[in-house]
């Protein structure tokens, strides 16, 4: 029996299209998981009249893990800084899986508490440096999604052991 995992997806509105492309590829990898049945929550499912702030807070409370898609716009979002990240970066908070959606400067950007957490980037011998999802194209985007899937499965395995 697969364990149900609810994933809260956090990303900047400015990155909506790129985040959707990444999530499509990631969901393709996650669907046939042997161990986990993934459910994803993102803020594109609001109905007219719903109170979006309350819905987001409820989704954060109910999730098992936060998948944060890091970009300059993500780091610059006051809403994300004030209302989403604290749950995932505070001591004893929920598990966070940071994935670099667009390039950021790890030394000069304010990482909003993520500086102590490994942020996923794709490593390949042919690359001069690790790449964000947005820097990849073609089959490298597929490889990026596969590697993120492998990393998340390994992380979930360690969380489950605790």
Image (tube, rainbow, N blue to C red):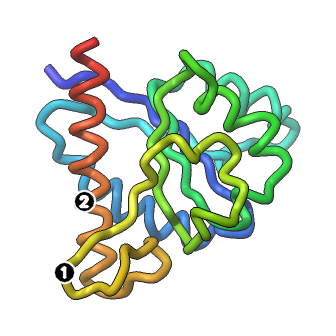
Alpha-carbon distance for marks 1 and 2?
Answer: 14 Å
User: Which residue is found at the position 65% from the left and 68% from the top?
Assistant: 15
Q: Quadrant of residue 2?
A: top left
Q: Which residue appears at 58% of the width and 44% of the height?
A: 114
Which residue: 28% across, 80% down? Answer: 140
Q: Which mark is residue 75?
A: none
Where, quadrant-wise, is the C terminus in this rendering? Answer: top left
Q: Which residue is mark 1?
A: 125
Give above or below for 126 relative to 33.
Answer: below
Coordinates of residue 67 in the picture (x, y in percent) = 49, 44
* Front position among marks 1 and 2: 1
22 or 144, nearer to the observer = 144
Earlier along the polypeptide chain: callout 1 or callout 2?
Answer: 1
User: Is disc 2 placed on a helix, strand or loop?
Assistant: helix
How far from the left and from the top, in percent, is residue 7? 46, 36
* Residue shown at 31% from the left, 68% from the top: 144
Give the numbered dot on residue 147: 2
Residue sticking out furthest to the top? 162
* Label 1 residue SS: loop
Q: Is residue 14 left or right of residue 17?
A: right
Q: Percent from the top left, x then y, of residue 155? A: 29, 35
Q: Split into 4 quadrants, where in the image is the N terminus?
A: top left
Crowding around mark 2 (Cα neighbors within 10 Å: few <14, some 14 to 19, many 20+) is some
Quadrant location of residue 46?
Answer: top right
**Spot occupied by residue 22 in the image (x, y as percentages of width and height):** 44, 66
| Residue 71 versus residue 6 in the image, above or below | below
């Amino acid at each position: 029996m697969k364990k149900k995992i609810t994933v809260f997806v956090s990303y900047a509105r400015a990155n909506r299209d790129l985040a959707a492309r990444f999530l499509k590829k990631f969901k393709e990898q996650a669907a046939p998981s042997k161990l986990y049945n993934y459910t994803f929550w993102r803020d594109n499912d609001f109905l007219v009249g719903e109170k979006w702030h309350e819905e987001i807070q409820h989704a954060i409370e109910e999730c098992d893990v936060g998948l944060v898609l890091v970009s300059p716009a993500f780091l610059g979002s006051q809403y994300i800084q004030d209302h989403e990240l604290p749950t995932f970066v505070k001591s004893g908070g929920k598990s966070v899986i940071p994935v670099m959606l667009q390039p950021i400067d790890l030394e000069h950007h304010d990482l909003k508490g993520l500086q102590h957490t490994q942020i996923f980037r794709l490593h390949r011998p042919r690359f001069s440096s690790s790449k964000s999802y947005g820097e990849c194209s073609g089959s490298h985007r597929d490889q990026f999604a596969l590697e993120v899937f492998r990393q998340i499965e390994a992380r979930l395995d360690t969380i489950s052991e605790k």
